[in-house]
Amino acid sequence: MSGTRWLDEDEQRTWRAYVRTSQLLQEALERQLQRDSGMPHAYYMILVVLSESPGRTMTMTELSAMLQYSVSRLSHAVSRLEEKGWVRRVKQQEDRRTTVAELTDEGFAAIVEAAPGHVEEVRRVLFDPLTPGQVRQFHEILATILAAFDHRADAEPSRALDGAAQ
């Protein structure tokens, strides 16, 4: 294929280090949350987003877009969280077609209990090996990459969030 911009040696080394680091980080967070709180990282993220939302509620469409979860993945996870009594789904009064996910008091208590261990694991595997200067550089690098994604999303034609959210 002509025009392929192959990675040079430094880029290839950096890319592979990033992929491996990302995998190890996700695995460490998953293990810690399962061991200490009995929940997958995906469920933890749902609880965190709801806990930080006004009224501890968010429409399923907004939640799906925020977490970049497919609607079916989110629906399955919320069903499991409902079984635990941590989240409930309610129809919005103004528009009965819209479903709202609401964090229950039990769900809030679960996130409060899980957060200290999770934060300690994030600190242990991500921040402790870095100097304060490296943490600042890391943030700047990530902010640059995220801005490029935001710019790309702004340039793409808008998509309906009727289930197409990834």
Image (tube, helix red, strand yellow):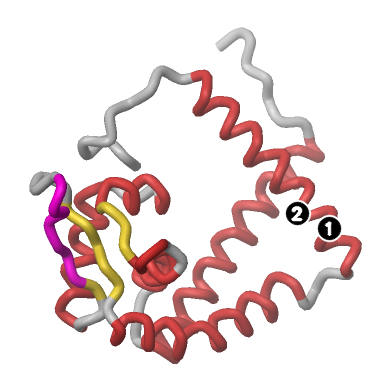
Q: Where in the figure is residue 77, as x and y percent of width and height?
A: 24, 65
Q: Residue at x 32, y 50 (%)?
A: 64
Q: 92 or 104, which lies in front?
A: 92
| Amino acid, disc 1 | Arg
Which of the 4 image quarters holds residue 122?
bottom right
Q: Which residue is mark 1?
A: 136
Q: Residue at x 38, y 88 (%)?
A: 109
Which of the 4 image quarters holds residue 162?
top left
Q: Which residue is mark 2?
A: 139
Q: Where in the figure is residue 142, as x and y percent of width and height?
A: 70, 48
Question: Is residue 120 rendered magenta in the image?
Answer: no
Q: Which residues are magenta?
A: 88-94
Q: Residue at x 52, y 75 (%)?
A: 29
Q: Are marks 2 and 1 in contact (CB under 8 Å)?
A: yes
Query: Neighbour class for label 1 at 10 Å: few (<14), some, many (≥20)?
Result: few
Q: Where in the figure is residue 38, as x and y percent of width and height?
A: 34, 86
| Amino acid, disc 2 | His
